[in-house]
Image (cartoon, rainbow, N blue to C red):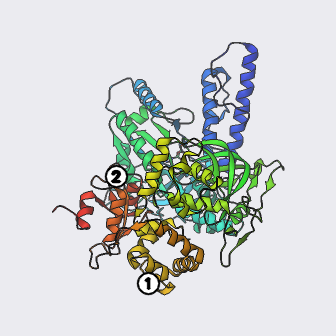
Amino acid sequence: MPFKTRENLEPVNDHDKEKEIAGQLEELREAIRYHNNRYYVLDDPEISDAEYDRLFKRLLDLEALYPHLITPDSPSKQVGAKPQETFSPVKHSLPMLSLENCFGDHDIRDFDARVKRFLKDDRPLDYTVEPKIDGLAVELVYENGMLSVASTRGDGYVGENVTNNIKTILTVPIRLTRPRDNSPIPGLLEVRGEVYMEKSAFNDLNQERLLKNLPLFANPRNAAAGSLRQLDHRVTARRPLNMFCYGVGRISGAAFETQLDLMVALQAWGLRVNRPHIRLCSTIDEVVAYCHELEEKRQGFPFEIDGAVVKVNQLALQMSLGQKSRSPRWAFACKFSPTQETTRITAIEVQVGRTGALTPVAHLEPVEVGGVFVKRATLHNQEEINKKDIRVGDTVIVQRAGDVIPEVVTPIKSKRTGEEKVFVMPTQCPVCGGEAGKKTGEVVLRCLNPNCPAQAKESLKHFVSKGAMNIEGLGDKIISQLIQKGLIADEADIYGLGFDDLIRLDKIEKKSAENLISAIEKSKKTTLARFIYALGIRHVGEHVAELISTGLGDIKAIESATEDDISKIKGIGREIAGSIVAYFEDESNRMLIDRLLAAGIEFEEVERPEASSSISGKSFIITGTLSSMERSAAKELIVKKGGRFVTSLSSKTDFLVAGDSPGSKLEKARLLGVKIIDENEFLSLVGEGNG
Ligand code: IVH
């Protein structure tokens, strides 16, 4: 993009300069028109929403400084894009507007002040605040309770006729229901709302498209728009779309005082409204707080939200405030920080994991996504690269949502110059030069050299990590030096390190060397589960290690267990059991364990789960901090009592324990209908309560 977004925006008087600004404005308008077409008409954007918002803001800022340069055809005065001619046009009886964007608390308070200035009186005013669903706007016209026409927003005046397609959405009623109080249904109702696709449905759809070699949708919004705007409604019918209604156009035979009353009525007529998340706020502080709350809960919603929509609640005041060319004066969108950005892949590097797995990682031109600078993104494997057709030099959409590792969503093929290079995974390990290949029955490409130093380093990093032996201070840099200097080659060597070895390393002081020695010493007292996990056996994460530890009780029993013995343990399947047996069959692994035990590693006695425990077999997830114990202690308690400690939440999870300052899991649990308990309830459930 040739536009600088942080340019000085001081107005100038100079005639030449003004000509230059006029030129810049025209370029900006052209660019926005182009991107409008890609987004609204083709459902195939070339830039992230965040970049689009920046272009748009730049246009608004420049036009505010040079109002005499505003042209009537500026995108700042228009909504969306002209409807596609392949659909028959539908004229909206009242224009379908867009919303002004706010990007922070200051903008929100500014909006409130403007509303109050405009109204010039002290009539009481409150706001409704609700999630801004990232989908596409549609209008449904009901005549005498029957759905007659459904259309997209189009350019705000004329949209596309998608009636047959809309009728395939199960939650859109073909006929309105009569409310319980038997009040009449309006003779005419033009209801507006957002059609969207849930995140999980979008992921499934893209997976399916990957398999069929079809281009991927960049996000759920594009998937929803692409699915609704199909010429063959049978295609739409196969796509899991849904709709939330959020407003009306014309309505006859019913009158309301507030936005909230209107929403309640829509619901009573059988229309789907995002009622649980619409909140009435009587002060702007409450508005700000709820916008923040929604942003925090963002990941927990099953659908994508890109902001909060704030509306003046009193409909009479909405009328007085009226509208500007493209947006009403009574509502605005508070935009959240973006989760997607556009950037470029400068190189693809192959990383070697502790099990030798070779993973391609994209190096990116650094880009800020939701407040974090992203420089790398995983590409998973060659198959994924092929399916998505990702090349070095490609402009791509990257995504970072919550705690998820950044990933490349899709390349933007229309931006290719012909210079992009196809990437092929190497046939040799990039670190040791050993042969790379796939083990029988596996899809993962690995370095097959058991003595690969990169694998050794990753194994060591895993061995000392927090959930494993927890040796504080033994970080990446120290491990690298220790390997380079030949002081360690495997895990058991760590226990042979002395103060004199450590003090010889670069950038390590006496105190740190002493601390490290005591951390190594301290790690010798551990639990069997931690030790098993630390060994880095394939498919054995913390939870499986816990199950094996409680299931078999001691290291000797584990070493000699057969596949049958292990797969008898609840929660452990054949594949995991096979991997464990294979690990212990390897002579070098058994020798390593002997050396570790000889170095003094010892385990606290394993407590077998109580057979008739009230929580046996039940799964627990914890969010927030507990006041009476560390999370690891709570986890051990759950396992001891025969429950299962899980880290990923699903509708199958039995309990979510909510501690102080819970995270987004709490909201997700609510949405999934998982039982939520507090710390006291948890303690009494596991039989550790006071009463
Ligand atoms: S109210 C006058 N409420 O956001 C327009 N819009 O950027 C009133 N949107 O065109 C719109 N969720 O497509 C409203 N809860 C919500 C919304 C919402 C998503 C979309 C809608 C609108 C766009 C504006």
Q: Residue furthest front?
A: 500
Q: Position of residue 183 (x, y in %)?
A: 32, 56
| Front residue of this view, candidates 31 and 545 | 545
Q: How many marks?
A: 2
Residue bearing the label numbered 2: 625
Mark 2: which amino acid?
A: Thr
| Front residue of this view, candidates 578 and 443 | 578
**Displayed quadrant of residue 678:** bottom left
Q: Position of residue 424 (x, y in %)?
A: 77, 61
Name the residue rendered at 69%, 49% in the picture.
363
Q: Is residue 372 visible?
A: yes
Q: Residue furthest right?
A: 418
Residue bearing the label numbered 1: 568
Q: Is residue 207 above or below residue 93?
A: below
Query: Would residue 121 appear left or right of 64 to someone viewing this image?
Result: left
Q: Is residue 313 visible?
A: no
Name the residue rendered at 37%, 33% in the picture.
284
Label 2 crowd (10 A; few <14 / some 14-19 / many >=20): some
Query: Would residue 116 appear left or right of 362 to someone viewing this image?
Result: left
Tell me the SS state at disc 2: loop
| Front residue of this view, candidates 478 and 683 | 478
Distance between the alpha carbons at the discs numbered 1 and 2: 34 Å
Quadrant of the image containing the C terminus: bottom left
Q: Position of residue 311 (x, y in %)?
A: 42, 39
